[in-house]
Image (cartoon, rainbow, N blue to C red):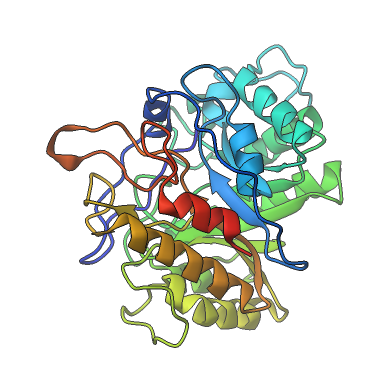
Amino acid sequence: MRRLVPGPLPAALATVAVGLVMLWLAVGAQATVPAGAARTSGSVPKLIWGPVTLPNGRSAFPTYHRLGVDVFQIDLNWAQTAPTPPADPDNPSDPAYQWPAQLSQAIAQAARYRIKICLLVQGTPGWANGGRASDWAPNRASDYGNFLTAAARRYPSVHLWMIWGEPNRAGNFYPMPPNSKVGPRRYALILNAGYYALKGVSKANIVIGGDTWSFGTVEPADFVKWMRLPNGEPPPLDYYGHNPFSRRFPNLSEKPYYPGGRDINDIDTLDAQLDQVYHRPVKLWLSEFTVSSNHGNRAFSFAVSRQAQARWLTAAFRLANSVNYVAGMGWFDLVDQPPLPDNQALTTGLLTYQLTPKPAYYAYQRAP
């Protein structure tokens, strides 16, 4: 499942734990909720992160359908899928590959409800990076490209692909020295390899690169500037992914308040920079946005009331639909964590840990 890694946000967000989604599977029975409202033609696609199944073993996809979700986002971990080197790395049938059953389940359920899948592919096996941890880049970007070729052949119905998650922060992608070109340039190599691998399987594949978050070890403004190939060109991509977490209520009229940072109110600034770098319009894939309700927690030090959480969600989706450069707007996540000591449990869900709809549930459902 997805590893949420927004990292420390100045005076706003705390670090995020690994594997939080698995804790969601400890909550109660599936909620009964009304059918989703009709959406406006031409609306920005609605994205979400969340579990594949609820604790009673039932699929979560009927809930996503009622919410009006267009795209379900989920991880594909290279290190777990290829723990040993494949002899034929482009071939998804190579016996070294251990494709996750849960992902096949998600793809089948999504197809039933006409929900698209977006795969975030990250995690380097030790055999590909010199025995380091999985958050280290591969020694050869071509190994990552080979894996994406096999994955695209394994999942031909999937056409949305994210290249790593929040690589601009240490803890998600190494090497990433602070305020240095080293990390962005290393990332550019795997984005380049992934792009051509995915396009080589199907021209319909959409490659989402960058995938930064609001701040980071290398801040988004610098990451975009320094994300270059050895020839000095920016790596190819279709959309630029970004997680614009913020403690500011969504409102594009506000000016940037932190140099180099890019939160929800700075997406116009990010868009303008991308247009300059790529010399063409580049749409934003805003994979994750959220705000905690009730109390701060182990991931976010900032929280609002449940009613205010719904207002934040509504404002964020309205903001995304008010411009012409957003390709998708996402929410993290579906279900709150069960209570933990010291208020550490995440409360970013649309449902309580008992699966009761919060006001944000209906706000997401009504979002354009």
Residue at 18 percent of width and 41 percent of height: 343
Q: Position of residue 234 (x, y in %)?
A: 63, 68
Pick the residue in front: 73 or 358.
Answer: 358
Q: Position of residue 60 (x, y in %)?
A: 58, 30
Quarter holding the C terminus is bottom right
Q: Is residue 53 visible?
A: yes
Pick the residue in front: 102 or 18.
Answer: 102
Q: Position of residue 187 (x, y in %)?
A: 53, 54
Residue at 51 percent of width and 75 percent of height: 267
Pick the residue in front: 146 or 45.
Answer: 45
Residue at 70 percent of width and 11 percent of height: 95
The answer to which image quadrant residue 52 occupies is top right
Residue with the most extreme left position? 342
Relative to 184, 18 lies left or right = left
Relative to 337, 324 lies left or right = right
Rendered view: 333 above or below 268: above
Residue with the most extreme top position? 95
Q: Is residue 82 visible?
A: no
Q: How many marks?
A: 0
The answer to which image quadrant residue 354 occupies is top left
Q: Position of residue 80 (x, y in %)?
A: 53, 23
The answer to which image quadrant residue 88 occupies is top right
Residue at 33 percent of width and 80 percent of height: 259
Pick the residue in front: 66 or 186.
Answer: 66
Rendered view: 165 above or below 270: above
